[in-house]
Amino acid sequence: MDLNNNQLLKTQNYIDGNWTDGVAKLAVTDPAIGKLVAEIADGSAADAEQAVAAAHAAFPAWSRKTAGERAAVLKRWYQLIVDNREDLARLLTLEQGKPLAEALGEIDYGASFIEWFAEECRRAYGQTIPTHNPGMRLSTIRQPVGVVTCITPWNFPNAMITRKAGPALAAGCTVVVKPASETPLSALALCALGEQAGLPAGTLNVVVGSDSAAIGKVLTQDPRVSKFTFTGSTPVGKLLMAQCASTVKKMSMELGGNAPFIVFDDADIDMAVNACMASKFRNAGQTCVSTNRIYVQESVHDAFVDKLAAAIEKLQAGHGLEEGTTLGPLIFRRAVDRVHGLVEEAVANGAKLRLGGDFLSNGENYYAATLLTDVDDSMRISQEEIFGPLAVVQKFREEEEVIQCANNTPFGLAAYVMSENIHRANRVVEALEYGIVACNAGVFSTTVAPFGGIKESGIGREGGVEGMAEFYETKYCCYGV
Ligand code: NAD
């Protein structure tokens, strides 16, 4: 593999500051061409137990450091990530498939969580509370929750780790991560740089393993773990929540979505098309905040669809490392077959295929950028998270009607509203039952704002001051005088 810094290609687990082997090997393949990228130590539940023990042992010393001392280590880590961004992006594209420009964007976005939380941890203020009794003094202090375990998905193999580990380490917690077994290289490369930055042994551990269920049980049930944080699908999230119940762990869940994208007749149509392209086709549609259902008001429907089709036709499928590629592969073949099944079923039920709808000759994991119109909410395609390069459009008449349709889902992660009318925009943004609403924008994720869902899309927030609060306990201190 062609990297400037070969130290970043790690093939062992990282436990207690040591690079360790597993009993077997796990193959990481390039989803674009199916070629083997690396063979990784396949970690077990026993490795996860060791990692939890290491994190537990490292917690007292790390949590007692001053915020400034922890921030200094984290800022070195941030700088090393930035200095190695090209290599980290190449690794990410090789194991995950997204175009290199998007991978570079993810590395920068991922790094920003480490820098921002390194600064934010200096402001973990408590309170002095006006007392209810002259014989007592009341205050609060904020303390790190303890050992934090994380399970992360393959669609953002770098940023979904830093968004959790950044604030956790900054708060004084120690961390064990189980990345998706499809994309462990980005996680291990982050550890290599963390080690170089001076993160003490045991503060950050990564256990890669094909037996997710066994490792997951340790991370959700070990009594030494205080908090579990998960990003992934809603069904797996529900299972892990149940597992966490046995020891009443604090939990954060960043789960699936079913984002509506609403285009009103007063929208700037060119802007709406650009926003829709960014939100729908980034990462080949494999993003939890990806547009899922596009609702367009009757009078602008045809104009919007024509412009959207023209933009989709410009997408260029290819290997993520090839110049000009804007559409990479899906992560594995069964994702392609699933998307194709959704298209076939929708067409059989009356949807019209405007573009795409088929496999591509680039490789078995590629699917054509597809546009369906005349879709309705009774179709499976409108009810499930599509997670592929497939835009589905339907018409609506009235504001009230579209708000009801948009909210009629068990999910509540992100929603999009396109309107130039400020009164309507305010009304609709407030009425949508989602954790995030983007108005006249297709991309909104940032370190400084809280990201997360309501309903079956999750619990808790990542990023911003809310993201930091997830890793503290508030202790009420009452002193008799
Ligand atoms: P997934 O739930 O299949 O896997 C996520 C992680 O859980 C992986 O590391 C996997 O190995 C692990 N896992 C799977 N089964 C497990 C089990 N029984 N016990 C323990 N761990 C287990 O999800 P995915 O397909 O990797 O990711 C896509 C999903 O993630 C989508 O639904 C997407 O919306 C969601 N997602 C959400 C956010 C968010 O912030 N809300 C961000 C990115 C992705």
Image (cartoon, rainbow, N blue to C red):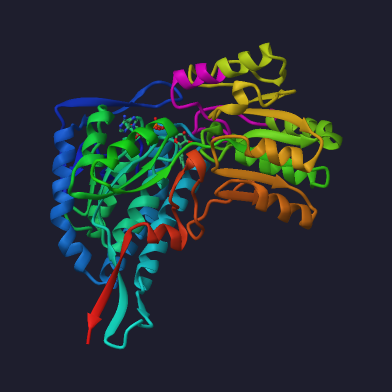
Residue 328 colored magenta? yes
Residue extent of the magenta highlight: 313-340
Say if 36 sits above or below 204 in the image.
above
Q: Is 221 on the left or on the right of 102, as rendered?
A: left
Say if 342 sits above or below 246 in the image.
above
Residue 389 in view of the camera: no
Say if 314 sits above or below 55 in the image.
above
Dividing the picture into quadrants, the one containing residue 170 is: bottom left
Q: Is 379 on the left or on the right of 71, as rendered?
A: right
Q: Is 305 on the left or on the right of 279, as rendered?
A: right
Q: Position of residue 329 (x, y in %)?
A: 50, 26
Magenta segment main secondary structure:
loop
Q: Position of residue 118 (x, y in %)?
A: 36, 65
Between residue 88 and residue 409, name the one nearer to us. 409
Q: In which quadrant is the N terminus drawn? A: top left
Dividing the picture into quadrants, the one containing residue 261 is: top right
Q: Residue furthest right?
A: 299
Q: Residue at x 55, y 31 (%)?
A: 284
Q: Position of residue 28 (x, y in %)?
A: 32, 28
Q: Residue at x 54, y 43 (%)?
A: 413
Q: Residue furthest top?
A: 348
Q: In which quadrant is the C terminus drawn? A: bottom left
Q: Residue at x 18, y 51 (%)?
A: 55
